[in-house]
Image (spheres, rainbow, N blue to C red):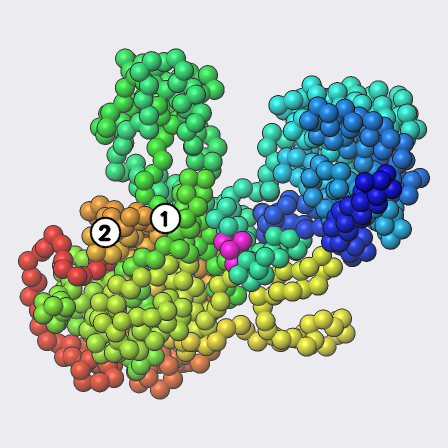
Amino acid sequence: MTVLSLIAVAGFAVAIWAAWLFHDMPDASDLADYRPPTATRAYAWDGTLIGEFSRERRIFVPYDNIPPQLAQAFLAAEDRNFFKHAGLDYTGIIRASAKDIINLAQGRRLESGSTITQQVAKNILLTNDATIGRKLKEALIAQQLDHTLSKERVLELYLNEIWLGYRSYGVGAAAYNYFGKSITDLDLAQSAYLASLPKGPDNYHPIRRKAQAMQRRNWVLDQMAEAGWVTRAQANAAKQEDLVVQPEPTRAKYRDADYFVEEVRRRGLATLGPKLTEGGYYMRTTLDPRLQSAARTALMDGLERYDHRHGWRGAWGHVATLTGWEQVAKNTVTPAERRTWRAAVVEDVKGGVRIKTVEGQSGMLSPEDVAWARAGKGIGAGDLIFVAPDDKGGADFRLKQVPAVNGALVAMDPESGRVLAMVGGYSFSLSSFNRATQAFRQPGSAFKPIVYATALESGYTPASIVVDGPISLPGANGQAWTPENYEHEYLGPLPLRKGLELSLNTMTVRLAQGVGMPKISASAIRLGVVTKMENVLAMALGAGETTVFRLTGAYSAFVNGGRKIEPHLIELVQDREGKTIFKADQRDCDRCTMGFNGDESPRVPPSGAQVWDPITAYQITSMLQGVVQRGTGAAASVLGRPTGGKTGTTSEFRSAWFVGFTPHIVVGTYIGFDDNRSLGEGEQGARAALPIFIGFMQEANKYFAPDDFRAPPNARYAMVRGIREAFKPGTEPKLVDDSLTGPQPYDQVFGNGVTGAPNAAAAVNPLAPVPPKPPAKKDEVNGLYD
């Protein structure tokens, strides 16, 4: 074959290779409107940043907002001639190519020698493959970019796209993650350090490789001085600055809302889809940080109180010798929410218990905790435990134990459905399962207000009388179902209020019989408590499963005048241009965007469908106030302001509930084991869950006025057994409030002989003898407690 033939064959082969190489080459014009993926940032109601959602953690910063000093630092480190060349720096290419000959011979990676324009082409349009073909594509696209885009646009893309380590894409995220600052607040040394990172963030890690990081930073400062962008004196002064960064990049400074933020992420994905993690949205949530912190503290304290009552379960680990135990301790996860807890080892148990923390602090455990531990599983030398400083000064340290039990707390605005606080468990760092929204449990007697509200909607009144006495009904498999009251006591004929205040099971079952379970099931479904419910009487005692989130939302309708609200965590979402793409409040207001012209302000209708008559809602609210004043929730009277609520406890004490409210907030609390085993004898809602509600409300009430519940304007009133009750017009007893004489005592006029039941089946003779009290039983079959 002749030389010419070989040249022709070689040329043909090169042409085929070039055609294959460039057939799918991206078009540089695609970057004209390109925006790199940026994080969606979620904010609390008061503007506190609570979370970010992103595949690549990035905060997009327009070129005009990038400080010149920061841009110059990157130019000095990466491409000093950026504003002079046409996309390629031929001097740099020649220098890198000479090194690449040696690199290829030795099997090393090819040198970069890339301009900033080439890096933009590679990072956005190409891959990171270190091949000659990719380098050729990169060079061609870089030249296209230089002709298509302005220099400022190319530099903007580069500074926002570049990977800088520490979970940071782009200079905006890097400034925040490394230094906790906006880029406009960076000093010269910090700007130079960020500019040192593109060549390899791990090589210049600010903690693990601090010496190399400072050396590289100082080199960048020298390059800036050499280019004339800073004076030599400025560069030398910046070199003297220590490199101090945040120990760990965090998504938000506020850290009490992990369960809430994760629920926002799940709901955001359902609403916005994959764009949630790349669209750079502004998301305003409903969270009130003050209430969220109070909720987390109240729930954790309540779970620890329960756990302490049930004894010390023993050390979480043990070592045979006191050497090397620190490494074992460091590998153990403590609840991140308990920031004062420390892993420790028991050094000696003679004359008290001496411990040493993993940080090297030594001291004594409080005698009270030592006695508690010895009454439980015991404590001995070599035991690995958790301790916290004794803030009361009684000893050096207090013994701590991660509760095995768990729970949830949800707080809502009853008018709008805004979720003000949500805690889904003891510790998100130990378990991300959200028991507020994901744990379906029987609510027990906390469901009863829905039964009584349905009865009031069906013709019953606060004057209706229902018998509280033993009852036996056909059950499953031919066995009788015999629900019983918690105390195994029966009080005979009573008005509706007493059945709810004292949480009387047999009275509630009789009431459900009179109303009919289909109506009660329909009410529960309409309120969103459940999606479906069997029409069996056990459901009237809370045998159907629901969540704290759902039941708390349902209680809101009692407080707001009977409207069903939609509990929500996301209030508003806007895109990068400020356009609203999601809004929870869908009410129309034609005049709301107009400027004030002195006319009457717009009247926006209340949100939510009317599910209860406003008087029904007020009647139940009044009865639930009675639960706090005289019934199973009496401990909450310590709050000293209008408060209603209902306890709930399921069979065998598997779950404990309290859902309570004031005119401004509705709060649901729940305690139970994740495997649904018993909480233990006597651990009913009033003992286990109600104290959590009280602890939270003692803090929450600081932010709300002590208002009373609003009564419907058309309600009528009469005294029933010494209590002023509200009635729907036309259903009230004949003597009602009179402007001259005031309220007339209903009892004195009608005695106990009036039955307000709407049908004969529900009506009883209130003067009939009370059924005899059966012998007390330790447990009950298929029944529900409190």
Percent position of residue 490, x then y: 14, 64
Residue at image coords 65%, 22%: 209
Q: Quadrant of residue 514?
A: bottom left
Residue type for callout 1 = Gly
Most extreme residue toward the front, as rendered?
Answer: 1
- SS at mark 2 in the image: helix
In this rendering, is residue 658 above or below 175?
Answer: below
Percent position of residue 650, x then y: 24, 56
Residue type for callout 2 = Phe
- SS at mark 1 in the image: strand
Q: Which residue is mark 1?
A: 407
- For the question of whether residue 744 can be seen, the reply is no
Percent position of residue 699, x then y: 47, 47
- Magenta segment: 263-267
Classify mark 2: residues with Cα within 10 Å, few (<14), some (14-19) or many (20+): many
Q: Is residue 535 left or right of residue 101?
A: left
Q: Find residue 656 and name its label.
A: none
In this rendering, is residue 244 above or below 454?
Answer: above
Residue at image coords 36%, 13%: 322
In this rendering, is residue 392 above or below 58?
Answer: above
Query: How far is the residue under mark 1 from the one under mark 2?
Result: 14 Å
Q: Is residue 551 magenta?
A: no
Residue at image coords 85%, 23%: 222
Residue at image coords 57%, 42%: 254
